[in-house]
């Protein structure tokens, strides 16, 4: 890929890039904040629950608060209450 300036002149091409995938398939889990914590998809601190990895606040650490989490990588979850995949 190369940049083009305002006068239309093309700059030097960038080096090629290679990438590999992890092979991890994202999964969705709907459960109470307590159950997410027990399953290590979330953690609690001072009575509040947070998604593992991303650290999104999920509210009180109890069995009455329910969320859907999408595990996008090992040890990394995001809140996906509005649909999964997030």
Image (tube, helix red, strand yellow):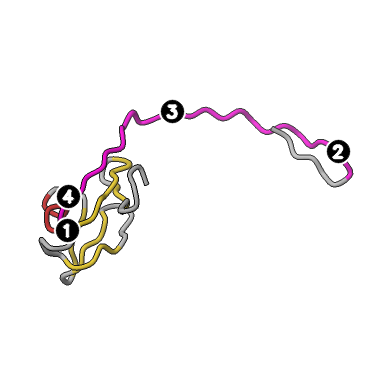
Of marks 3 and 4, the one in the foreground: 4
What is the span of residues highlighted in magenta in the rendered image? 7-32
Q: What is the secondary structure assignment of the residue under circle 1?
A: helix
How dense is the environment of label 2, judged by Cα within 10 Å: few (below 14), some, or many (20 and up)? few
How dense is the environment of label 3, judged by Cα within 10 Å: few (below 14), some, or many (20 and up)? few
Circles 2 and 4: CB atoms closer than 8 Å: no
| Location of residue 44 (image quadrant) | bottom left
Residue 25 highlighted magenta (yes or no): yes
**Sequence-wise first label, 1 or 3:** 3
Residue tagged 3: 20
Q: Where is residue 46 in the image (x, y as percent from the top left)?
A: 17, 72
**Sequence-wise first label, 3 or 4:** 3
Q: How far apart are marks 1 and 3 (CA)?
A: 33 Å
Of marks 1 and 4, the one in the foreground: 1
Circles 1 and 4: CB atoms closer than 8 Å: no
Residue tagged 1: 33
Along the horizontal axis of the image, is 78 left or right of 36?
Answer: right
Residue tagged 4: 40
| Location of residue 22 (image quadrant) | top left
């Amino acid at each position: 890929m190369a940049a083009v300036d305002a006068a239309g002149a093309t700059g030097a091409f960038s080096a090629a890039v290679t990438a590999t995938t992890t092979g991890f398939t994202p999964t969705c889990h709907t459960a109470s904040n307590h159950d997410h914590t027990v399953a290590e998809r979330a953690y609690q601190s001072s009575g509040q629950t947070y998604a593992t990895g991303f650290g999104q606040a999920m509210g009180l650490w109890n069995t009455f608060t329910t969320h859907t989490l999408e595990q996008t990588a090992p040890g990394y979850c995001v809140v996906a209450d509005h649909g999964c995949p997030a």
